[in-house]
């Protein structure tokens, strides 16, 4: 039969929140409850009759609670096939109670790891009995319903209330799928803890929170986001984020992380690349100067600030059509102004740890790499030329280098006075990238005399430094490493241009 009337239930949970109405419903329906330890005490304290598992197994909880339910009389009650005469006969022979519902959750392994607990505390949160109960009950969904998470209590209570204690095969199979989702995620988390240095070349990715997007990169493609967006952002206003919005938000967050704790910095991004970036004494001026970098591309862009957005800045932003605004906070007046466009997405960014690895599909497999956590610093500069950068140029070189790291290769970034003048992005040649940047800077009336240039990789020939110098560039930052580095150095020395080398390439494909 596909519909089963439940007569008994095993409950053994770590989290007791939300359990009370279920237990009371079981009492009302005459369902016999079996339980262990803290859950058993919780049920008894509610004044509801409960059968200790110890009375069934004739064994107490042993080894400090490590072994409570791991017994044939428990697993026999779960795994028996109710349409199998042999199984039913053995239940009677060994006095094993039939178990129709199993409610169990798992020790909070991931939370314990995230808390910074000791290794011993973490190991003790590897659940053995719970995971075994979940797998057994889910496997036998034909006869047993498994509730494996407190997040499913509401749905479960509704099912048994409407069914007067009965469940359908569809119900049980659906809860089995939820259970295997829980168990597989749990095992992946444990493996990743033991393999955090990737000594075993195996990839385990598990995200239990997902949402269906309106579509993917284009309307004819399906799109999904798997991750805890709510942990990272508080969404204050606007429409649902799209696939492309999320990619741009990711690019914006990673770029602005380079300026965390710095003076007010504002960035405007389009298609994962910054089209405007400036650092100033006030966020209002930083926005104004970031917008000046490319007011054309800013239309429909992603805006991000590293400090609170005030009313003056919000009024400027409000005149621009933009998809998303991100900041750590907003003044009350600023928020009201920004809410003036109903579809504008307004986000507060929370402090959360971002992944240390980058994963992308490739061919018939997956590519995984460490995130580029390296940020160039003055202390590591190799001064390649006779002329050294001025203090102002050094600040601009670091500013341009941070931006270059987060711009698609091949890329050249031109900056002056901590403002993006222009960048050449995603070009097949570095000369093309430089020419693109110079053309854009001039089209927006930037004076490049005294500006700096950053390159994500070395110059194989001196052509780039020559073009840059003839455009007014006074200082250059690049990783170095070409067998022809000296040609670029010689040109700079002959033309009074300073050059520093970082020794670190920042390709972004």
Image (cartoon, rainbow, N blue to C red):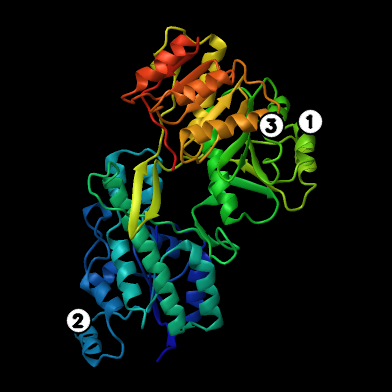
* Residue at point 38%, 58% (across, down): 38
Q: Is 422 on the left or on the right of 369, as rendered? A: right
Q: CA distance from mark 2 to mark 1?
A: 78 Å
> Which numbered circle lies on residue 94?
2
The quadrant in which the C terminus is found is: top left
In the image, 464 versus 378, the foreground residue is: 464
The quadrant in which the N terminus is found is: bottom left
Q: Which residue is mark 1?
A: 312
User: What is the secondary structure assignment of the residue under circle 1?
Assistant: helix
Q: From this viewpoint, is residue 147 visible?
A: no
In the image, 139 versus 117, the foreground residue is: 139
* Residue at point 60%, 64% (across, down): 219
Instruction: Where is residue 365? Give x, y as percent.
Output: 33, 58
Q: From this viewpoint, is residue 467 visible?
A: yes
> Which numbered circle lies on residue 443?
3
Q: Residues within 10 Å of mark 2 (few under 14, many from 20)?
A: few
Label 1 vs label 3, nearer the camera: 3
**Disc count in the image?**
3
In the image, 161 versus 434, the foreground residue is: 434
User: What is the secondary structure assignment of the residue under circle 2?
Assistant: loop
Image height of 64 relative to 77, above or below: above
Label 2 vs label 3, nearer the camera: 3
Instruction: Where is residue 178? Give x, y as percent.
Output: 42, 68
The quarter holding residue 99 reads bottom left
**Sequence order check, earlier mark of 2 and 1:** 2
Image height of 385 relative to 241, above or below: above
The quarter holding residue 307 reads top right
**Sequence order check, earlier mark of 2 and 3:** 2
Q: CA distance from mark 2 to mark 3?
A: 87 Å
Instruction: Where is residue 72? Give x, y as percent.
Output: 21, 73
* Residue at point 38%, 19% (across, down): 487
């Amino acid at each position: 039969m596909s519909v089963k009337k439940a007569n008994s239930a095993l409950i053994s949970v770590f989290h007791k929140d939300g359990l009370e109405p279920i237990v009371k419903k079981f009492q009302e329906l005459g369902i016999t409850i079996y339980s262990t330890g803290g859950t058993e005490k919780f049920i008894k304290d509610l004044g509801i009759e409960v059968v200790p598992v110890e009375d069934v197994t004739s064994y107490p909880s042993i080894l400090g609670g490590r072994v409570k339910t791991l017994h044939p009389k428990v697993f026999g009650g779960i795994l028996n096939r109710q349409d199998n005469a042999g199984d039913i006969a053995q239940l009677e022979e060994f006095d094993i109670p039939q178990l129709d519902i199993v409610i169990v959750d798992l020790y909070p392994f991931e939370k314990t790891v995230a808390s910074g607990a000791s290794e011993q505390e973490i190991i003790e949160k590897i659940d053995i009995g719970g995971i075994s109960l979940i797998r057994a009950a889910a496997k036998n969904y034909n006869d047993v319903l498994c509730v494996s998470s407190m997040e499913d209590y509401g749905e479960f209570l509704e099912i048994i209330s409407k069914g007067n204690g009965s469940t359908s095969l569809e119900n049980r199979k659906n809860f089995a799928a939820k259970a295997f989702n829980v168990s597989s995620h749990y095992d992946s988390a444990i493996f990743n803890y033991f393999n955090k240095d990737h000594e075993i070349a195996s990839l385990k990715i598990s995200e239990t929170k997902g949402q269906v997007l309106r579509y993917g990169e284009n309307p004819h493609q399906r799109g999904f986001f798997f991750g805890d967006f709510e942990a990272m952002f508080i969404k204050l206003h606007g429409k649902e984020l799209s696939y492309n919005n999320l990619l741009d938000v990711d690019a914006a967050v990673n770029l602005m992380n380079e300026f965390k704790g710095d003076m007010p910095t504002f960035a405007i991004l389009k298609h994962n690349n910054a089209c405007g970036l400036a650092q100033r004494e006030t966020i209002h001026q930083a926005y104004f100067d970031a917008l000046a970098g490319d007011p054309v591309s800013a239309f429909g862009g992603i805006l991000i600030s590293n400090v609170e957005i005030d009313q003056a800045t919000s009024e400027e932003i409000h005149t621009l059509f933009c998809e998303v605004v991100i900041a750590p906070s907003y003044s009350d007046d600023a928020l009201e102004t920004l809410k003036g466009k109903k579809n504008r997405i307004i986000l507060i960014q929370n402090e959360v740890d971002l992944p240390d690895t980058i994963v992308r599909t490739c061919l018939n497999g997956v590519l995984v790499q460490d995130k580029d956590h390296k940020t160039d610093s003055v202390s590591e500069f190799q001064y390649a030329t006779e002329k050294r950068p001025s203090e102002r140029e050094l600040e601009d070189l670091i500013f341009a280098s941070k931006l270059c790291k987060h711009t698609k290769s091949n890329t050249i970034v031109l900056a002056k006075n901590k403002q993006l003048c222009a960048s050449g992005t995603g070009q097949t040649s570095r000369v093309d990238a430089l020419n693109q940047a110079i053309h854009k800077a001039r089209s927006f009336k930037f004076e490049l005399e005294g500006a700096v240039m950053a390159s994500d990789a070395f110059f194989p020939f001196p052509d780039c430094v020559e073009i840059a110098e003839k455009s007014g560039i006074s200082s250059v930052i690049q990783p170095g490493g070409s067998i022809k580095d000296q040609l670029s150095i010689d040109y700079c020395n002959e033309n009074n241009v300073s050059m520093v080398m970082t020794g670190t390439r920042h390709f972004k494909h």
